[in-house]
Structures are given as structure tokens and as C-alpha cells.
Amino acid sequence: MEQPGSIQASLPEDIALKIASCLQVGDLCALGSCSRFWRDLCGSDFLWEPLARRRWPSLDSLTESSSADHGDSSSFKGWRDFYVNWHSEMAERAALVVQHVEQCLFSDSLEIRDYLKAIEHLSSMRLGFKDVEMFLFRPEVNVLLNLVGLHYCMHWLKVPAEHVMEALQNSKISQRQVSVKWWKLGRLFYGFRMRDESHSRSVTLQDLALPQENEVLSVLHRGAIHEVLRVQISVFHSTSTSWSFPERASL
């Protein structure tokens, strides 16, 4: 029987690279731990550069900012190291957004200003779709963080709905539900202001990725402006929750 070393020695490097290029990051790392041959081959820039570019499409600007942070472009040590270091950086950035949302939660509810601020943080930190999928599309985090990630992917990253839907299903969070309630300024009727209007919807994350739920995402995207006085997002509970809004002074 041939020894593993002799099998590897007889395997042309281009064929070995072709095999390794078909693997995802986790499998590539596992293969690289098998032997010295696979460790050296699986550390190749030929493999890690496309993985990095697929995960972070705006990679050129990321590498520029990374070099600026270090003050020297010569600090770049290869695509594998770049991928590992940037993955850690994105994990830290996502953790800051998680911390922000958790600090702003009150009785499992989030005000629209804090919700939109979380999305602004994701944008300024330049998280990609895969980063959101890894760090926010997880069943163990609050569903409102799932929603923040979904909204960011669809409106800021312009990820196609079918890709978002697939990511939600793969993460097993597609059927998690949120409740969105908003208050609109009462309409004028013969010179009198009618009572403020209350609207409420309970929807799954999967539904929010569909075109027919554009109304809810539109309300979340606009926030409390013009005729909308307040928007509040809550974790959905099967038992009804009391919603209240301070009375508006008479006009």
C-alpha cells in the first residue's frame, strides 16, 4: 500500500490546487491540517485571494484602509493572513452592533432611532453579506438583531431577496417573528385633527424578504418622519402585549 506522503508527492500541484479551490473556508483549513504538504498548499494566495474577494466585494478599498491603519502597505503578509485578520476585525465590529442593540432594548422592544443607528453602524463598519450571515443571522441572538441584518442586506448592500431568503433558511431563522407598530398623525377633517392612527403588523423574517411586505420595511426604512410619529419594533410573543403612546397635545 502506498504511503500518504508518496500519494501526495505523485499528485501534480495544479491538480491539488484545483481540488482545494473547490472547498469552503472551513474545509480548506481542515485539509491544511492533514500534513505538511497540504498545509503549504492550502496556504496559497491562489486559494485565499478569491475567497477573500467573494466575501468582501469592496476588497480594494478595505485593503487600502487596512494599509492606512498600519501605516505601511508592506505589512500585507499574504491573503490567508489577511482573511483571518479581517474575519477577526469584522467579528469585533459586529459585536459592537450587538452590544448597541442589547443596551437599547427595553422589554424586548427597540425604538426606531436605535434600530436605524444599528444599521448605520453596520454601514460605516462596512460589513459584507457573509459577515452579516455569520455574525447576525444566528438563532442564538435576539431576533431584532436578525432583523437589523436583514434590513441592512436588502436596503444598503442591495442583496437580492432570494439570496437573503436562502441565508435565513440556512441559518434556521426564517420563521422567527417580529412585531412592528407605528403611529401616524391624525388626519384633518373639517378643520379638526382626528385621533392619531395606530398600525401594527406581526411578520416573519422570511415574509420581510418578500415584495408583498414592502410596507413594513418601508416604514422601518423611513423611520419617524413626516406623518409617522413613532415606530417601535418588538420581539413577537404569542400572548398579546400592551402598547402605549403618550397622548399628543391638542392642536
Image (spheres, rainbow, N blue to C red):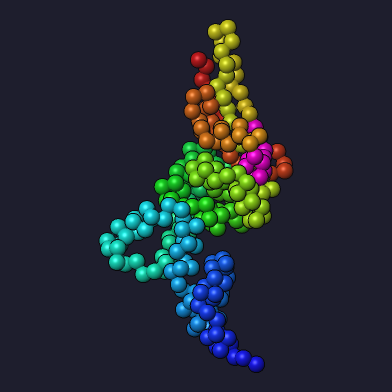
The single residue placed furthest to the left in the displayed view is 71
Residue 209 part of the magenta-drawn span: yes
Q: Is residue 122 left or right of residue 149?
A: left
Residue 250 in view in this figure: yes
Of 72 and 88, the residue lying toward us:
72
Picture coordinates of residue 210 (x, y %)? Answer: 64, 39
Identified at 54% across, 75% down, the residue is 16
- Give the magenta-colored segment's residue range: 200-210
Picture coordinates of residue 157 (x, y %)? Answer: 50, 45
The single residue placed furthest to the top in the displayed view is 190
30 up-or-down from 130: above or below:
below
Identified at 57% across, 16% down, the residue is 187
Identified at 48% across, 38% down, the residue is 113
Residue 151: quarter of image: top right
The single residue placed furthest to the bottom in the displayed view is 1
Of 25 and 12, the residue lying toward us:
12
Total marks drawn?
A: 0
Identified at 60% across, 48% down, the residue is 164
Of 206 and 183, the residue lying toward us:
206
24 up-or-down from 212: above or below:
below
Residue 143 in view in this figure: no
Picture coordinates of residue 241 (x, y %)? Answer: 67, 38
Picture coordinates of residue 99 (x, y %)? Answer: 49, 53
Q: Tell me the quadrant of the picture where the N terminus can be found.
A: bottom right
Q: Is residue 190 left or right of residue 54?
A: right
6 up-or-down from 192: above or below:
below
Residue 6 part of the magenta-drawn span: no
